[in-house]
Amino acid sequence: MLSGRAYDQVDMTAAKHQVSRGDDTRRSRRPRTGIRDVAAEAGVSITTVSDALNGKGRLPDTTRSHVRSVADRLGYRPSAAARTLRTGRSGLIGLTVTTYGEEPFTFTEFAYFAEMARAATSAALARGYALAILPATSQHDVWSNVALDGTVVVDPADHDPVVAELVRQGIPVVSDGRPASDLPVAGWVDNDHEAAVIGLLDHLAASGARRIGLLTGTGTDTYTRLSTEAYLGWCARVGQPPVYEAYPAHDPCAGALAADRLLARPDRPDAVYGLYDPNGTDLLAAARRYGLRVPEDLLLVCCSESDVYATTEPPVTTLSLQPGRIGSAVIQLLIDAIEDGAAARAAGAGRGRSAGRRTGTRHTGHTGALATQTAVRPAQQRVMPTELIVRASSQPRVRSVTVSQQRTPPAAGG
Amino acid sequence: MLSGRAYDQVDMTAAKHQVSRGDDTRRSRRPRTGIRDVAAEAGVSITTVSDALNGKGRLPDTTRSHVRSVADRLGYRPSAAARTLRTGRSGLIGLTVTTYGEEPFTFTEFAYFAEMARAATSAALARGYALAILPATSQHDVWSNVALDGTVVVDPADHDPVVAELVRQGIPVVSDGRPASDLPVAGWVDNDHEAAVIGLLDHLAASGARRIGLLTGTGTDTYTRLSTEAYLGWCARVGQPPVYEAYPAHDPCAGALAADRLLARPDRPDAVYGLYDPNGTDLLAAARRYGLRVPEDLLLVCCSESDVYATTEPPVTTLSLQPGRIGSAVIQLLIDAIEDGAAARAAGAGRGRSAGRRTGTRHTGHTGALATQTAVRPAQQRVMPTELIVRASSQPRVRSVTVSQQRTPPAAGG
DNA sequence: CCGTCGCGCAGAAACGTATCGGCTCATCAA
DNA sequence: TTGATGAGCCGATACGTTTCTGCGCGACGG
């Protein structure tokens, strides 16, 4: 009743809007300025405000600037939640890295992830997207609480349940690292591991290595598998018997032991390549234990993004997988997939609706949209070159040069 | 079939919904299974489904499990966007680091940020929130496109426009590093820089330093200011004339030059503390140029989180600011502020509404809510201890121990 | 002088959920 | 028999946008 009195006092012009709302909601809620308030203040409709601020519709510049000035004066900020609900786009991209150990969250453990995440974030922001880091396990309720436009998965496991659930929801997924064949990702980015290993072994051979050993992992991930296969292939080609030790890569102690085993073999190699980041220091320590001088008695290369190897004694030659370029490329692929998918969906919905109205067939829209998506984007893929950073550990004479090494990459998708 | 029958039995009740919808919208859009579909399939209402899945309302366990099984069977996933719009909570936290240089995005440039971000992400996930990394400039449209429950700001500038805009929108902000007095943040976390510097200088003096120099910055940020003041105060107390060089910290070259200047002075120090991460290697290089042995002729400490200083020649004593603990604490404070704020707002809205109905006063709800918020949370703050990792560079004899050093911190708010 | 066209704008229907209040029964005491 | 009680469930509304559809009207060609 009282509210009724007060309500009658108000002018009819603004009252129309009041009616559509919940009556007394106006004064009980917090005074967030919405698009309605801007419309009322500017004396135009909600549609006009929305069009003016988003640069859509047909409006004269006078109306546009007027609405903009009113919106600025009121300090209007559109609700991201409402926009997301309406448009179906959140502007948010997920980044998840599958962890092998028991640790819930180990990114930046190795420099690779830190640099990759940094580049991915930067690339996403440049295209207007934010990037959220999410856990690899679908247990966390976070996955269902945030609206994602797409997701980057680093090193997806063979039958990753997270990826499966995401594609089931129609969320594009792009992976860093070749996915297993049955993972229906929208694309992937990976290094040319075979070319990298071959180039690196050639470099060691050119430095005088006669028998090159490998420190590898027992895991079945594609990085380990492809690298090891390339090593075995190279050995077969040059006629050198393979000399390698494998260990569980996630075990922090096993690496040092494996390095020791490798140098304790009767057929001790005179050069070693270590597939994982800590192998360099482990091999240096093992060499010291056996009284081997680097590089005189043992040439050394390991795959790492860490710059500690620039200051070790001696500095160690490293193979860089260029995580920065990978992170950037992954984001480009993902956003392309997101925006192409949205465009296709919009077009498909339009077709579906008019067709449905005329013919009454039900499933046209749905299967049409899916067919369009798969037809237009048959899993984009990009192969990125690696970089061999040559330091003292891999050549008899000390000089520090950088050799960029790449094979002709396959054409980047359709 | 059965469900169809049951559905017809209900007749008017649920049918009205169909009418109110767009009629053919049902078949033209993508077939996202919403809460409506679950309700129809389970033969219950939307309310019941929502209550059953969220564990609210008064429902027998039979209904709960039935609804859950139907939802599982249909593969129902609630729309995060809709939930966010309705509840006003997105489950998303922003993390932004103000960059000084021209680089748009430089986190993980120093190990501090990498570790801090890692810990923050982990802590956020543990409490059900995701963390998105956002640019420091409000120019990017990302800020208005994602719905944030709160934001962590690392090293906020004096009159940070981003922070101002966020608090204007009522979004809680917690800062890593003491904010300038006029920044109305909900809380902050910082190290006890004064205690850290004093403890470190005492350590150097105990190692035999007679004249300790400082490599500091020209910036006005609180870290630089507090550390430098602590140094000057310590010098005054022990009666040592201050010996320091300041340089613009964001300039990558200036550091090496300043290190050189410091060691070229006529009153050359016999011990140096460098405030920034690269100072250690720069000082080592400068010492080598001047033929100074470390630690015999020059004791060395720098503030860094990088583990390269464990393997330099000699290893360098570092002061760790414990970014992991800081990142975790910042998130705890922020989420507490978010959830307390939400609870207060809910309570305030309830009071405001009933009071408004009875008395008819208008502004009670609004000012009451604001007063509640400021009264309940008067800017929480936490002071975290630092850790001095003692290595060969700061003591005549080689041993590697860890000295944890902290003052009695002020009671943590409230 | 009239039909048509296109510009400028408005109404209203979604998007998918949470939640307040209230409705309908069965049970039970008076 | 009946009013009270409470368990179990439902209708309707609001969250704040975007966008489809279409209306009024001035101008212009015939």
Image (tube, coloured by chain):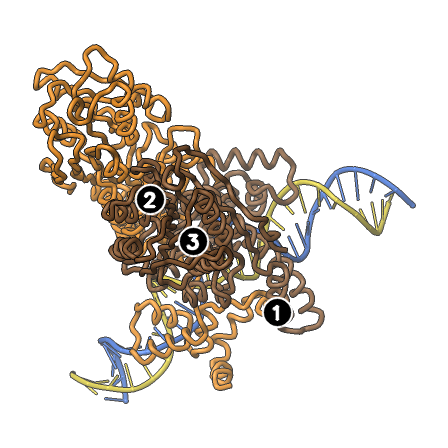
Chain colours: A brown, B orange, C yellow, D blue
Q: Residues within 10 Å of mark 3 (few under 14, many from 20)?
A: many
The residue to which callout 3 is attached is A94
The answer to which of marks 2 and 1 sits earlier in the sequence is 2
The answer to which of marks 3 and 2 sits earlier in the sequence is 3
The chain letter under disc 3 is A
Residues at discs 2 and 1 both on one chain = yes
> Is residue B288 visible in the rendered structure shown here?
yes
Identify the image quadrant of the N terminus of chain A.
bottom left
Viewed as shown, does residue B321 lie left or right of D24? left
Q: Position of residue C22 (x, y in %)?
A: 36, 70
Identify the image quadrant of the C terminus of chain A.
bottom right
Viewed as shown, does residue B87 lie left or right of B315? right
Q: Residues within 10 Å of mark 2 (few under 14, many from 20)?
A: some
Q: Which mark is residue A297?
A: 2
**Comparing marks 3 and 2, which lies closer to the viewer?**
2
The residue to which callout 1 is attached is A367
Disc 2, SS:
loop
Residue at 58% in and 44% down: A51
- Amino acid residing under circle 1: Thr
Is A274 drawn above or below residue A144 in the view shown? above
> Is residue B80 visible in the rendered structure shown here?
no
The chain letter under disc 1 is A
